Amino acid sequence: MDSLQPVIADPFVVSLRSALGRALGWLTYPRKPEELFAAFAPRQFGPVRAEVVALEPHFDGCATLVLETDRRFEEHRAGQFVALTLEVDGVRRTRCFSISSAPRGGRGPRHIELTIKSTARGAVTPRLVHPSIVGATVELSQPTGSFVLEDALPPRLLFVTGGSGITPVVSMLRSLDRKAIREGGPRAKVTLLHFARSEREALFLAELREMPWLELHLVTEEALGRAPSLDEASLAEVVSDFENTRTYACGPAPLLKAIEAAFAARGASHALTIERFQSSFEPGAGEGTGTVRFARSNKSSNDPRTLLVVAEAQGLQPKSGCRIGICGTCHCKKLSGATRDLRTGEVSTEANVDVALCSTVAIGDVSIDL
Amino acid sequence: MKNDCPLTPAQLESFGDEMYAIHQRARAARGAEDVAYIRGVIRTQLRCEVGGRALLFASFVPGAWIAGTALLSLSKILENMEIGHNVMHGQYDFSGDPALSSRSYEWDSTCPSDQWRHSHNYLHHTFTNVSGVDHDLGYRVLRVDEAQPWRWHRVPQLAYAAGLAAVFQWGVAGHDVDMPKYVATPSAERDPLDVQRVREIKSKAWRQVRRDYLLFPLLAGPNALAVLAGNVVANLARNVWAAAVIYCGHFPEQAKTFAPETLEGEGRGHFYLRQLLGSANFDGPRWLHVLSGHLSHQIEHHLFPDVPAWRYPALSSEVCAVCEKYGLPYNTGSLSGQLLSALKRIARLSLPSRQEPALAPLGLHGS
Ligand code: FES
């Protein structure tokens, strides 16, 4: 088993620690003790950090980042992702990436690899795949996500991936490969169906071909001469009874939709596990073209006016003060989508950032924490 | 009338545009430097606080008490003025760093941050120096504006001003609630919002008092009294300093007050003009600016409250140039000069005014 057993603590110790922590909090108030510790000993407290120690380009705009994490980073399970935070011009920006190295399969004991394909005009990914990133420090979340292999390996496994959707899967395949080497042969029959634009852009191809136990099907747009498609019949050509095969899929939305439909058609949705990309958001067609959703009150509207006015028109009562973008009373979290700040003209596509409702308009679909 | 608009409508509009352009440029320039600056200040402040408290614990060593108290005072001043006040204005919100977020920052003061954000960021910064709306005009204690009615109890108000300075954080804590009215109202008839606010103030104040006047002294054991005294003096020093800076911001003689009608249909140019005429700066060395939270640049702060304050000195030359172009006053002087001017005004208004209040709307038409 790859994951470590959690240490079970003595309940007395636990309650003593929490009492001490509270008393400490009375002394450090209004700051939290952790904030104080982090200020004086950032290596031991505060967010988990990692240093970019190497960058290995695959093709234009796509590279593998080798990170050396600090001691607090926990072992990941193959298929999980991390949220990486990079400060760009003083602005914290967070993106999620699957870990492509196998657990304990990095260059060193505390190394992980992220294979990243940059989005054109993105605020973060072009910087991450640029050589100047080597030596930079980034913040990491602990590994999360439930797109992982079950502990007991099923007799047959099918992976369906598209483009950089192969990154979590390659971590799984690498850990299966290590297992196969250890055990002198694979225990399961494993098939990978991978879609890529061209053979050159098919990530990890050479390495995958070196895995003797893996049945690899590569479909490229280049070879087909058209965009590849997937349906029940074409999937059955790869694995005839796919409905009885434990399947993992990761890739662009249309691919996931197609595979979901194929499994649903055979009444086998339970056999399929999907990892959706945190697609980096592109602004919609223009201001006032989308729907503003107020997530907590479950209301939405196509009103193109400022978010404050739209919310009020929906009968909500967000706090407001000056209504001209001065006082900050109306600040509220934007959960997703693109907005324009009317004060600066700036477009924000970040998720989970504060916006001033009174001086912000939506561009395309936007979700607000209200 | 004295408050009539010094600019013609056309001038007012182009004045507003020029100020707005400076504002836009300053907003667009926010970046890594600002974040590095404020984090550096926070680091320094935390060092001062920890060092100060440690020295107070060792106050049996000669000189340690003085040094500890000085460091703790410095820490509190930095935290309230350069960090708390400015972070809560949202000057660093652009960074997306939760530690620098205006919505969640809680400062080292008996005033709950939420109420501060309402009374200061909204009421004071939106209705700056508008008689009867901006309670920072005298904090309901002082008469600093002819339009406020004179009563006999105003006579000793210079002493009130000194008293308020000594307990300034408590004055600020009660600011969002009309405390005299609250106390006079029977509890059953009190506004539930005010009741809630008073509950928050009590809880915040208790945490502050528990830390400074109870836990740290107790932890010091035999040194309890020295630690207690150090904390009292540090809070006092911070209070007096904050009050002095704030009296200098809007009370010097040339800082204008405005009639409520000013607000009707107020445009961009008007808004900037009112902020400019209602505020006063003081000059001094860089450390003085930092200790004042750059409220030494009250004018720039009121024009651009969401711009990181340490940039105000650099912006002031641009603002000055615009003022000169339109023949507008740019009120600045030495710290002592401005303070004296503010105290003079407080003293003058402790007696009834000779003429009727000359407040007029900051009307569109020049005199
Ligand atoms: S209401 Fe004041 S900033 Fe939006």
Image (spheres, rainbow, N blue to C red):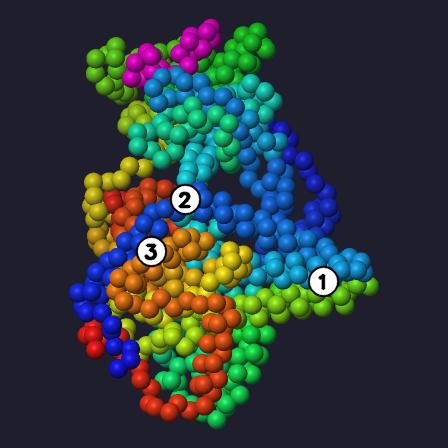
Q: Mark 1 lies on which chain?
A: B
Visible residue check, residue B197: no
Q: Which element type, helix, strand or loop, lies under badge 2?
A: loop
**Closer to us: B140 or A180:** B140
Q: Are marks 3 and 1 on the same chain?
A: yes
Q: Mark 3 lies on which chain?
A: B
Which portion, as a residue range, is magenta?
Answer: A194-214
Distance CA(mark 3)–CA(mark 1): 42 Å
Q: What is the quadrant of the N terminus of chain A in the image?
A: top right
Q: Is residue A332 above or below residue A119?
A: below
Residue A300: x, y in percent?
A: 27, 52
Q: Which mark is residue B338?
A: none
Which one is closest to the eye, mark 1 or mark 2? 1
Distance CA(mark 2)–CA(mark 3): 20 Å
Which one is closest to the eye, mark 3 or mark 1? 3
Instruction: Give the class, few, some or many, for how many residues have Cα within 10 Å of label 2's Cα (few <14, many ≥20).
Output: some
Residue type at tag 1: Ile
Q: Mark 2 lies on which chain?
A: B
Q: In this view, does B184 lie above or below A44?
A: below
Q: Which mark is residue B66?
A: 1
The residue lying at 58 percent from left, 48 percent from top is: B43
Residue B278: x, y in percent?
A: 36, 71
Q: In which quarter of the image is residue A240?
A: top left
The residue lying at 63 percent from left, 38 percent from top is: A44
Label 1 vs 2, first from the N-terminus: 2
